[in-house]
Amino acid sequence: MIPSLIITFREGLEAFLIVGIILAYLTRTQQQELKKYVYYGSFAAIIASLVAAAAFNLLAIQFAGRNEQLFEGVVMLLAAAVLTSMIIWMLKESAHIKGDIQRKVSQSATTGLAVLAFVSVFREGIETVLFLGAAAMGAERSTDVLMGGIAGLAASLVITYAVFKSTVNLDIKIFFKVTSVFMILFAAGLTAHGVHELQEVAVVPVIIEHVWDTNSILDENGTAGSLARSLLGYNGNPSLLEVLSYAGYYVSAYLFYRYTTRREMNSGNAG
C-alpha cells in the first residue's frame, strides 16, 4: 500500500501542480476564458489514462498462466527503467519547471493549451498505470495497491489545493528530492523482483539459488518483511543474480545521472 501511495501522491502532485500553474498564469494574465481548454485537455487525459489502465489489465490477462511470470518480469524491469529516467529528469527540471510551463502557455493558442494540459496529465497517467501495475504484481493483495493509489491521489489533490488557495509555499525541488529517495528504493526492488520473475521461467540463469537466508531473522512474508519487500525490494533468500541486479541498479542509476548531467553541461558550454 505504501509504495502505491507514494507513487500516486507524487505523480498526482506533478499533474495537479502543472495544471494549477497553467490556470494560475491564465488568471494572472486575465485570460480566464481560456481555462476551459485546460479543463478539456485534462479531462481527456484522465479518460485516456483510464483506457490505458483497462488495456494494461486486458494485456495482463492474456499472459495469465504459463507466460504470466515472463510478462511480470518484463513489466517490472520496464517500470524501473521509466521510473528512473523520470526521477532523474524531474530532479534536474524541478528548479525551473514553473517558468518553463508559463513560457509554453504564453506561446500556445487555444488548442495548444488543451494539448499542453492533455500531454502533461496523460504522461503522468501512463506512468502511474505502469508503476501501479508493476507494484500490484509484487504485492500480496492488489486491493492494497488500489487503496494506496486512491489515498495518494487524494492527498496530492488536497496539497495542491492548499498551495494555490493559501499562503502555503511548497518547495518543489525539496519535495521531489525527498520523494525521489523512496522511488529509487522502489525501483531497485522492482529490478531485483523483475529478475526473479525471469529466473522463474528460465529466461535468465539462477547461477546461485540462495546467496543467504535471513527469513529466520526477518521473514519476507511477515508484516515487517512484507513492508520491507514492498518499499526496499527485500528478499530473505535472493539468488546471486538478484543481488547483483539490485546493487547494479544503484550503480547504473548513478552513472546515468552523471552522464546526462555532464552532457547537458557540455551542451551549455558549447552554446
Image (cartoon, rainbow, N blue to C red):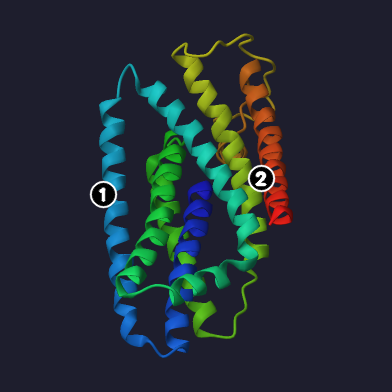
Residue 155 lies left or right of residue 208; in this view the side is left
| Mark 1 element type | helix
Quadrant for residue 65, please give it. top left
Quadrant including the C terminus: bottom right
Quadrant for residue 85, please give it. top right
Closer to the observer: label 2 or label 1? 2
Residue 219 lies left or right of residue 49; in this view the side is right
Which residue is denoted by mark 1 in the rendering? 51
Query: How many numbered dots are placed on residues in this image?
Result: 2
Q: Which residue does the image show at 38% across and 26% down from the upper left?
A: 71
Residue 215 visible to the viewer: no
Quadrant for residue 239, please give it. top right
> In the image, what residue type sits under mark 2?
Thr
Label 2 – label 1 distance at C-alpha: 33 Å
Residue 209 lies left or right of residue 70; in this view the side is right
Q: Position of residue 204 (x, y in %)?
A: 52, 14
Which residue is denoted by mark 2 in the rendering? 260
| Mark 2 element type | helix
